[in-house]
């Protein structure tokens, strides 16, 4: 900063006010501001986050703990997070906590030690009770994205999507096409996936149909998991004519396996996914799926984390829960029952 001040011909305090965007008793002129910013660029000046923290200034670092970075949906969410943070001058410190709760706890500790201004949980970590309990006491704001249904405890602000409404929209679409034998494929019974399966069961029960034996399959959230589910469903005495998958990854696995077995999608089998990842529009046939507004959801999470909303972190009021509505994107993987 001393070098920048010398190059620009101003005091170090002026450089500090301009580069840290702090108001001063005597505002800097536009010419002075441009001169300082030009000198900073030419000298390659970058503020040191830990030095900023020691002076009580924001470090402009936002920590993110992501549940599964190999999932295309979460990869897109992280991309949206980095873009949204960069608009506000923040950088993202990323931690991947796929394996154990202990790993997630360790990551959260690292992010706090790195003086992050806030921590964002990307994915549903409600089952990791030790992590949630630890983050309740975090010295920085914590916001959770895609954190499941309202029934569960809400220790910090959450931004989520109405998964149940999304599943209902998918099933309403399929029943309108004449499908009665509709199966569900999902992962383990936890987190937001549990919400989606419960919505499926409730929808079929409300129609008086009930869930036929074997029509709910639990498989890993992978392409291979989708193929495995299709094989199991096709072995049933009365195979389904339509399948709702808890994620697009599973739906794509089902479509690929159907193609390999010469099952015509959608003439012989309609398939609906959930997420609307970028690949969904590029499958053959293109995937009908439930769209989640990733960018607006991430933007709201960042706004809450860095204090751009009306909610007061210091007041300790009930944490807000912002719920976005999904919408069904109808493409080519669904058709009337033959």
Image: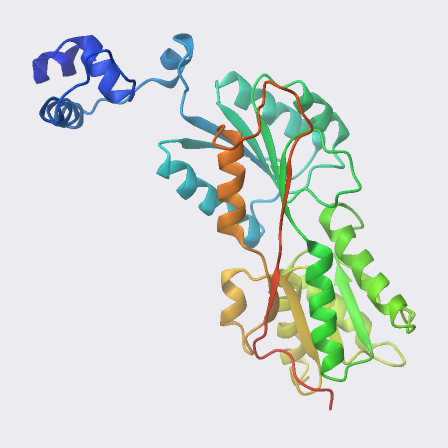
Nearest the viewer among 261 and 51 is 51
Instruction: Estimate the x, y position of residue 218 in percent, counting from the top left.
Output: 79, 58
Give me the residue at 76% from left, 37% from top.
127
Identify the residue shown where x is 74% and y is 33%: 128
In the displayed structure image, the side of residue 237 where residue 11 appears, left or right: left
Percent x, y of residue 77:
52, 47
In this view, 176 is above or below 59: below
Report x, y in % for residue 160.
Answer: 63, 46
Q: Pick the residue in front: 268 or 88.
A: 88
Asked if residue 291 lies left or right of residue 233, the reply is: left
Residue at screen point 11% across, 21% down: 32
Where does the image place residue 7, in percent across and percent down from the top left? 8, 16
Left or right of residue 16: residue 107: right
Q: In which quarter of the image is residue 82?
A: top left
User: With respect to residue 49, does 67 lie above or below?
Assistant: below
Q: Residue at x 10, y 24 (%)?
A: 35
For residue 61, side relative to residue 228 (left or right): left
Nearer to me, 306 or 115: 306
Can the viewer see residue 226 in this picture? Answer: yes
């Amino acid at each position: 900063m001393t070098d920048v001040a010398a190059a620009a011909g101003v005091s170090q305090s002026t450089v500090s006010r301009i580069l840290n965007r702090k108001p001063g008793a005597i505002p800097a002129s536009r010419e002075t501001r441009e001169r300082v910013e030009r000198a900073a660029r030419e000298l390659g000046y970058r503020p040191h986050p830990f030095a900023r923290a020691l002076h009580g200034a924001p470090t402009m670092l936002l920590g993110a703990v992501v549940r599964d970075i190999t999932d295309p949906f979460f990869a897109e969410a992280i991309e949206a997070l980095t873009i949204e943070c960069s608009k506000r001058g923040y950088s993202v410190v990323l931690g991947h906590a796929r394996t154990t709760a202990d790993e997630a706890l360790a990551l959260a500790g690292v992010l706090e030690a790195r003086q992050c201004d806030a921590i964002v949980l990307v994915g549903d970590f409600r089952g990791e009770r030790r992590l949630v309990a630890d983050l309740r006491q975090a010295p920085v704001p914590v916001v959770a994205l895609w954190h499941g249904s309202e029934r569960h405890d809400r220790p910090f602000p959450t931004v989520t999507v109405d998964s149940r409404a999304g599943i209902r929209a998918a099933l309403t679409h399929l029943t309108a096409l004449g499908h009665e034998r509709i199966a569900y494929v999902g992962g383990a019974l936890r987190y937001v996936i549990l919400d989606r399966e419960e919505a499926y069961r409730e929808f079929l029960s409300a129609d008086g149909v009930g869930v036929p034996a074997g029509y709910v399959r639990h498989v890993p959230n992978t392409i291979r998991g989708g193929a495995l589910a299709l094989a199991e469903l096709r072995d049933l005495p009365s195979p389904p004519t339509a399948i709702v998958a808890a994620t697009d990854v599973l739906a794509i696995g089902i479509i690929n396996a159907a193609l390999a077995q010469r099952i015509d999608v959608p003439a012989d089998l309609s398939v609906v996914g959930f997420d609307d990842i970028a690949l969904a529009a590029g499958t053959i046939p293109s995937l009908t799926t439930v769209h989640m507004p990733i960018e607006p959801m991430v933007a709201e999470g960042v706004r809450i984390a860095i204090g751009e909303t009306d909610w007061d972190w210091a007041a300790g009021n009930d944490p807000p829960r912002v719920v976005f509505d999904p919408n069904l994107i109808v493409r080519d993987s669904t058709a009337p029952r033959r």
